[in-house]
């Protein structure tokens, strides 16, 4: 059966409402899980309200109706139903429901469920459900599912048709989890799990049903990860033996010492490069931890062994900064480096493309232009993508597709929490740089109430007077009719005219033309511009050693990762640096938590874990790809024990 129309009670209107809720078949109803449960399987007494320390007590009780009365006059006249059990007396206050006078009968017994509290010297409840007492109640002495509602769907209607779907479709469900694992983990069969997650017989079996379905979701996902891994392993190649004399010489000649994490990452990438499997590795670490030099050093064995390397960055300015870094690093070698971008004149692009195809270029650094069809390589062996979350999966594949069995390194300044590593990246290797290079100045973070902004201006003024620079970041580009927030355009004018008239200011946001944007960043990098008013577009930017102040206004509007990435734009040298998180007094609890976290730590890995805890995996899993996993019931944060068990079992069963 595949049509909703085959179920009783579904007409054109309800069919439309169900489709709006994403329900297109009876099978969809089976997996339209409750969002909560109303536990009416145990009875309470009215007297429990007296011992409560909170504002109210949720009770399921059996009471006699003893009297009726009214209070108020005219339209505000309200019915009160006096009730009692063998422990105490109380009142049901029927705001807007005077019609209930005909539903209750004095002296009769009723099941009643609601939140009771002490008000005006008596036990009262104004939000309640009830039904006449019987030995076989419809909605009492059981656990009641509570479903998400959209459009004109009602709870009663959903329960009715889901019950039908279970009756006619549930028996045809087949176990996805092998029987041995169901038995080993004391899980339910799939038909029993689905039935009891909707209409549980008791609390114990409900817990088992929930655990079964969460385990099933994790198990299937981990199986898909193993399938991807096997698919990758099937693409084996002849083992390489990359030369590394040039790499070793370059490391020795560096004017600084690599951190242990950097050395380990270089070694891991080299081992992958010699493997019989094409490399797919993420290099993760905080802004400024030294990922770029690890990438360049890792390219040397490929170049020395006759392969070409491509290095792709999200912006032309960042790509040019990488070009300068590579030119300095490889200045004493014969490595041929080139640059390509969309703004390069066609005549120059043509020369670069020709040299690249002939194998006359060892290292090409560029932007999205590297992906264009005319760009061809003679022997692409290694591809590096910086700030890889700025590129789509198809774009990254297009780059590696320009070579034969190309090794691929993705670099990200958004640390991936351990839970996500285990869940979403089982088929991808991860190198981590936790330690920061020596000589980096300390970043102090301060939270500032909006009313005290003048103190921030005074501090920034002293820093600029001493030869330093500052970022001012705002949540909006321009003034909004709907949001009472500061914006970059008007604040740029205010900073330039009223606050820092003696210093050169500039404006940067997503609507600024690319050429102007690059001119501004170049001027800021050279120190010609002292103050940059911007939106979060500066989250990914170039190194400006003398930028020591980051002022983020309406900081409560930004996510944890964005705040940390913005802060990473300063502290790029040995100078002490300062971040000011300016907030308004009206904040949500989540916003307060974010500001506390960002103030208390500069550790990007701790911040990533907290971000995952506060926000869930949504945006963070964008590192992998959009829509990579869609768990209906399982939660990778709350259900880590089940996740780890499902992962262990999947590996054991399918390896």
Image (spheres, rainbow, N blue to C red):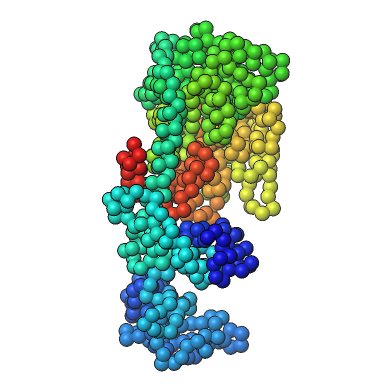
Residue 631 rendering spot, x and y as whole percentages? 46, 50
Reply above or below: 209 against 551. Answer: below
Q: Quadrant of residue 431?
A: top left
Residue 62 rendering spot, x and y as whole percentages? 37, 82
Q: Viewer-proximal residue, 65 or 116?
A: 65
At horizontal 55% and vertical 51% (from top left) the residue drawn is: 584
| Residue 621 appears left or right of 193 | right
Q: Viewer-proximal residue, 381 or 487?
A: 381
At horizontal 61% and vertical 85% (from top left) the residue drawn is: 75
| Residue 68 appears left or right of 188 | right
Reply above or below: 470 against 258. Answer: below
Report whether residue 500 is seen.
Answer: no
Q: Quadrant of residue 60?
A: bottom left
At horizontal 53% and vertical 10% (from top left) the residue drawn is: 335
Q: Viewer-proximal residue, 502 or 342?
A: 342
- Figure label count: 0
At horizontal 40% and vertical 87% (from top left) the residue drawn is: 109
Residue 238 rendering spot, x and y as whole percentages? 42, 18
Q: Quadrant of residue 649?
A: top left
Reply above or below: 234 against 253. Answer: below
Report whether residue 422 is seen.
Answer: yes
């Amino acid at each position: 059966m595949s049509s909703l129309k085959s179920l009783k009670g579904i007409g054109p209107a309800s069919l439309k409402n169900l489709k709006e809720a994403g329900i297109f078949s009876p099978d969809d109803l089976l997996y339209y899980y409750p969002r909560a449960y109303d536990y009416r399987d145990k009875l309470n007494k009215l007297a429990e309200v007296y011992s409560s320390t909170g504002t109210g007590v949720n009770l399921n009780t059996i009471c006699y109706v003893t009297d009726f009365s009214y209070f108020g006059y005219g339209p505000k006249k309200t019915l009160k139903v006096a009730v009692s059990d063998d422990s105490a007396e109380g009142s049901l206050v029927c705001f807007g429901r005077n019609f209930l006078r005909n539903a209750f009968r004095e002296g009769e017994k009723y099941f009643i469920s609601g939140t009771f509290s002490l008000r005006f010297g008596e036990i009262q409840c104004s939000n309640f459900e009830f039904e006449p007492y019987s030995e076989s109640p419809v909605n009492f002495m059981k656990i009641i599912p509570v479903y998400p509602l959209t459009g004109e769907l009602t709870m009663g209607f959903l329960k009715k048709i889901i019950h039908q779907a279970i009756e006619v479709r549930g028996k045809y469900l087949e176990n996805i989890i092998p029987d041995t694992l169901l038995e080993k983990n004391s899980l339910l069969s799939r038909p029993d799990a689905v039935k009891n997650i909707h209409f549980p017989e008791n609390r114990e079996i409900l817990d088992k049903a929930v655990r079964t379905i969460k385990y099933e979701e994790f198990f299937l996902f981990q199986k898909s990860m193993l399938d991807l891994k096997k698919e990758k392993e099937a693409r084996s190649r002849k083992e390489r033996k990359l030369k590394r004399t040039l790499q070793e010489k370059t490391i020795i000649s560096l004017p600084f010492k690599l951190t242990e994490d950097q050395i380990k990452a270089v070694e891991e990438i080299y081992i992958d490069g010699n493997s019989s499997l094409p490399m797919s590795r993420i290099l993760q670490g905080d802004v400024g931890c030294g990922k770029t030099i690890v990438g360049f050093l890792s390219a040397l064995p490929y170049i020395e062994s006759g392969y070409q390397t491509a290095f792709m960055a999200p912006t032309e300015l960042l790509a040019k900064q990488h070009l300068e870094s590579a030119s300095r690093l490889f200045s004493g070698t014969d490595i041929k480096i080139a640059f390509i971008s969309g703004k390069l004149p066609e005549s120059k692009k043509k020369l670069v493309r020709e040299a690249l195809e002939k194998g006359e270029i060892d290292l090409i650094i560029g932007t999205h232009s590297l992906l264009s069809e005319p760009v061809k390589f003679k022997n692409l062996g290694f591809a590096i993508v910086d700030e890889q979350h700025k590129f789509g999966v198809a774009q990254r594949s297009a780059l590696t597709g320009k070579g034969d069995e190309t090794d691929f390194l993705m670099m990200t300044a958004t640390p991936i929490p351990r839970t996500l590593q285990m869940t979403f990246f089982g088929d991808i290797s991860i190198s981590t740089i936790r330690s920061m290079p020596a000589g980096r100045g300390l970043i102090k973070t301060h939270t500032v109430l909006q009313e005290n902004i003048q103190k921030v201006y005074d501090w920034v003024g002293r820093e600029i007077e001493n030869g330093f620079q500052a970022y001012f970041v705002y949540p909006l580009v321009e003034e909004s009719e709907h949001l009472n927030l500061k914006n970059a355009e008007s604040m740029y004018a205010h900073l330039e005219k009223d606050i820092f008239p003696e210093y050169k200011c500039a404006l940067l946001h997503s609507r600024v033309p690319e050429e102007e944007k690059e001119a501004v960043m170049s001027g800021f990098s050279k120190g010609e511009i002292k103050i940059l008013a911007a939106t979060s577009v500066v989250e990914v930017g170039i190194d400006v050693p003398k930028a020591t102040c980051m002022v983020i206004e309406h900081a409560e509007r930004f996510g944890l990762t964005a705040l940390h990435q913005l802060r990473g734009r300063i502290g790029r040298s040995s100078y002490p640096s300062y971040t000011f998180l300016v907030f308004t007094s009206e904040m949500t609890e989540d916003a307060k938590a974010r500001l506390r976290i960002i103030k208390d730590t500069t550790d990007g890995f701790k911040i990533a874990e907290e971000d995952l805890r506060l926000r869930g995996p949504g945006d963070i899993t964008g590192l992998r790809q959009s829509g990579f996993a869609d768990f209906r019931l399982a939660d990778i944060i709350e259900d880590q024990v089940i996740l780890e068990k499902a992962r262990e079992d999947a590996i054991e069963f399918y390896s």
